[in-house]
Image (tube, coloured by chain):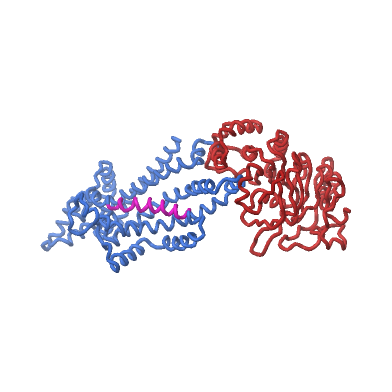
Amino acid sequence: MSLLVDDLHVHYRTLSGDVQAVDGVSFGIADGEIMGLAGESGCGKSTLGNSLIALTGRMRYVAGTVELDGEELPIGVPDKMVPYRFRSVSLIPQYAMSALNPTRKIGKLTTELLRSRHVDPRAVLPEMVRRLELVQLSSDILDRYPIELSGGMKQRTVMVLSTLLNPSLLIADEITSALDVSTQKAVAEMLVEFRTRGFVKSMIVITHDLSILYQIADTIMIMYAGMMAERASANTIVAAPRHPYTKMLIASLPETGVRFDESRLAGIQGRPPSLLGPPRGCRFRERCPVAYERCAEVPPVIEVAPGHLVACWRAG
Amino acid sequence: MRSYFSRKLVTYGLTFFVAVTIDWAIPRLMPGNPIQGLIARMTLPPGASQAVTAYYEKVYGLNQPIWHQYLSFWTGLIHGNLGQSIYVVGSPVSSVIAQALPYTLGLLVPAILLGWYAGNKVGAMAARRKVLDNTVLPAGYLLTATPYMWLALLLAWVFGSVLRILPLAGGSTFGMPPSFSWPFIESLLQHWFLPFASLFLVGFGGWAIGMRNVIIYELEADYAHYLEALGAPQRLIRRYAFRNAMLPQITGLALAIGAVVAGALVTEIVFAYPGLGSLVFNAILNSDYFLLQGIFLFIIIGVLIANFVVDVVYVLVDPRTRIGMQGGRT
C-alpha cells in the first residue's frame, strides 16, 4: 500500500460553525494505482485531496491518520508537511491555468522553486525538457512567460512541473473540467502515461466527470456529503454499483445510442445536505429511493466483495 | 516596441500642446489686469496713468489682438523666451523661475520617492504582521485623508510654535547670504524639513495602505497557493507577491505625481518656502500673466517627464506590457 488514510476528519471553519467537509474517510491506494475520486460539488472530494498536501486557510485537521509509504504524514502541522510536499506528495491544482506566477519566465520560476527546495536545477532541468517534449511542449517555453501559453499548454506545464521530483502520490484536482472534450482525453492519457513511466507512483484523480474516470482510473471512490459511499474497481462501479447514490449517478450519465428526446436523462432529486450540522444516520437518506427505518443509523462500510466497499444498509 | 513609444510620444506631444494652451489662457481669464496692479503701486501725477498704462501695455505686448498674443507666446516659447515678469520688475521669467526651481525640486523629488518607497515597504510588512497591521492601517488612513496644508499647519504649529525646534517659514535663515558652508546648509536643511515631512507623511499613508491591500490580494492568488502546495518557503512566495504588487503601485505613482505637485504648491505657501508654490501665489496676486505661464509650463513639463519615466519603467518591469506591445498573444 502506498497510501493509507484512516478515519480522516477535516473541517472548514466558518462564522456559523464547522463544516464537516471530510467526516471519517478511510481508504488505501496501492502502488501504481490511479484512484478516481468522484461526487457532487461540495461533497468534500477537493477538501480530502487538498488536505493530503496542504491545508488551506480555513481548513482544520480534526482527526485521523495518513500514511504514505509506511511513513505517517503530519498533515495537521503545515510546517512539518513542507519537506513532503513536491517530493513525496504533489498536486496539480484545480486552477492550473493560473497556477504560474505571471511575471516570471517558466524556466526561471522552476529554477527558483527547485533552489528553494534545495534541489540542484542543473540535475533536474534536462529531465524537465524531456518530459515537456513528452507532453508535446517544446523546451523554449522555459524562456516564455505563462501568459504567452494557451490554457492547455499551461496545464501541461503544471503537470510536468508538479511531477518533476517523482512524487509517490499525485493529487490531480479537477484538472479536466476547464478543457474541451478532445483536450480532456489527451490530458487524461498523459496522466496514465506518467504513471506508466513511473514519474508518479500512485494518483488520486478528483473529478465530477465519471466518464473520464472510467477511462483512466483503476479504482473509483464515490463520496457523498463528506463520507465515502462506495469504492470499487472502475468496472465494478460502472457496471455493478451497489450504493443507491452510485447507481443514480451512473444512471444520470448520457449513453451513446440512446435518444434523449424520447427518454429524459435521469437526475437525482433534491440537494445534498448542509455539512454544517449534517443529519444523523445515512446522509443520503433524504434523497434515497430505497431508504427505510434502519437508515436513521450511520451505515457501516462493508466489503461486499474483495475490494468492493459500500456504506449502505441495503447493500449487505 | 518602437511603435509603442512613438505612439506614447504623440500622446505626450498632444497633451503638452493642449496643456500649454490652457496654461496661456487661464491667467488671461482672471479678473484684473497686471498693468493696473503695477500702476497702483507707483505714485504717478494725476492724468499720467493713462499714458503709463499704454506704455506698459505696449512693452508687454498686451495691446495686441489676442490671437497675436497667443502666437507670439509660442514663438517666444520655441526660442526659450518666457517673457518678462511684471511682479518682479525687470527680471526675465526664466531667471525668476530658475531661482525658485531648486527649492521645489529639492522638496518634491525626495518627498515623492521616499514616501512611495517607505510606504510600499511598510505596507508590505503590515500585510504579514498582525500587530503592525493594526497600527499602520489606521495611521495610514488618517494620514492619507489629511489635506497637505492642514498637516503642514499642524506640523508648523507643533514644531515651530510650541516646541520651537524648527523654523516656521522661509527657505533659509533670513539675511544669511547663500554660500557653500556648513551653517548655511544646516539652515537650508532645517527649513526644508517640515515642508518635506508634511508631503512625505501624506504620501506615505496612501502608499502603505495601497501596498498592504495589494499584497494581501497577491498572497491569496492562485500562484501563491500553488507554490505553497509545492512546499516553497514563504520567503519566495512573498518575493513574488511583492514584485507583482509593485506593478499597480508604479502606475499609481504616475497618477499621483500631479496631485503631489499641487500639494507641494499649497505646502510651500504655508511655510513661505521660496519655491514655485510661493511664486505662483504671488504671481496670481499680481496677475502676472507671464510668470504664471512660465511656472505652470515647468510644472507641465515636470509632470509629463515623470509620467514618461514611469511608462518606461513599467514596460521594463512588467512582461505583460512588453508582450502586448510585440503583438503577442495574451
Q: Position of residue A259 (x, y in %)?
A: 83, 43
Report which quarter residue A158 is drawn in: top right
Vertical side of B45 occupied by A212: above or below = above
Towards the viewer: B316 or B94 = B316
The quarter of the picture where the N terminus of chain B appears is: top left
Q: Position of residue A223 (x, y in %)?
A: 76, 52
Q: Colour of chain B?
A: blue
Give the magenta part as a residue range.
B103-124
The red-coloured chain is labelled A
- Look at the image and say whether residue B126 sits in the magenta stretch: no
The quarter of the picture where the C terminus of chain B appears is: top right
Is A282 left or right of B54, judged from the image as shown? right
- Look at the image and say whether residue B107 sits in the magenta stretch: yes
Query: Furthest residue to the left?
Result: B45
Is residue B67 visible in the rendered structure shown here? yes
Towards the viewer: B214 or A63 = A63
Vertical side of A262 occupied by B174: above or below = below
Is residue B283 visible in the rendered structure shown here? no
Query: Furthest residue to the front?
Result: A70
Vertical side of B54 occupied by A153: above or below = above
Q: Position of residue B85 (x, y in %)?
A: 21, 52
Towards the viewer: A65 or B85 = A65
Q: Position of residue B56 (x, y in %)?
A: 18, 53
Is B210 left or right of B21, judged from the image as shown? right
Magenta span: chief secondary structure? helix
The count of marks equals: 0
